């Protein structure tokens, strides 16, 4: 944001300092896009599972009480956004969370939010 821009009202609240340090609006778009990918409860659940175990579509479907085609749809979206990776073993495809900084940080953020929102048990 333009460092020389002034606000209509000056309340000495530090807003000018925040304006100087504010990320580019495109950065917020990027973050919103990532959050949108995890905004679907089923997709979020699949991502969380794959942060803890490598698994095939059939078993993910059984773990989530979803159809294999529905799971495959969510896996495609997660993979397109580079949050998960896959490997083939014979005829079977296995999926797990990507070992990237962003996937790991999202995993930890999900668990922290779970702890705040659902403090009934250990989600790790």
Image (spheres, helix red, strand yellow):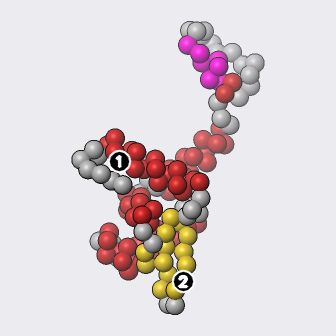
The Cα–Cα distance between marks 1 and 2, rounded to whole angstroms, is 32 Å
Q: Is residue 19 visible?
A: yes
Q: How many numbered discs?
A: 2
Residue 9 higher or lower than 94, as above or below = above
Q: Which mark is residue 114?
A: 1
Q: Is residue 56 left or right of residue 5?
A: left
Which residue has dot 2 on it? Answer: 88
Find residue 59 and report its horizontal and vertical position in percent.
Answer: 36, 77
Whether the residues at callouts 1 and 2 have beta carbons within 8 Å, the answer is no
- Toward the bottom, the furthest residue is 90
Residue 116 higher or lower than 98, as above or below = above
For the C terminus, the quadrant is bottom left
Residue drawn at (42%, 68%) of the image = 53
- Please give the range of residues in magenta: 13-19
Secondary element at tag 2:
strand
Find residue 104 and report its horizontal and vertical position in percent.
Answer: 52, 55
- Toward the left, the furthest residue is 120
């Amino acid at each position: 944001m333009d460092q020389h821009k002034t606000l209509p009202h000056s309340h000495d609240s530090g807003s000018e300092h925040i304006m100087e340090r504010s990320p580019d609006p495109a950065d917020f778009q990027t973050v919103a896009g990532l959050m949108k990918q995890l905004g679907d409860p089923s997709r979020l659940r699949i991502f969380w599972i794959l942060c803890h175990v490598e698994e095939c579509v059939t078993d993910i479907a059984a773990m989530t009480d979803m159809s294999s085609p529905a799971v495959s749809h969510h896996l495609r979206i997660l993979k397109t956004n580079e949050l998960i990776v896959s490997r083939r073993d014979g005829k079977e495809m296995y999926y797990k969370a990507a070992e990237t900084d962003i996937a790991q940080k999202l995993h930890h953020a999900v668990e922290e939010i779970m702890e705040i929102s659902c403090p009934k048990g250990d989600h790790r």
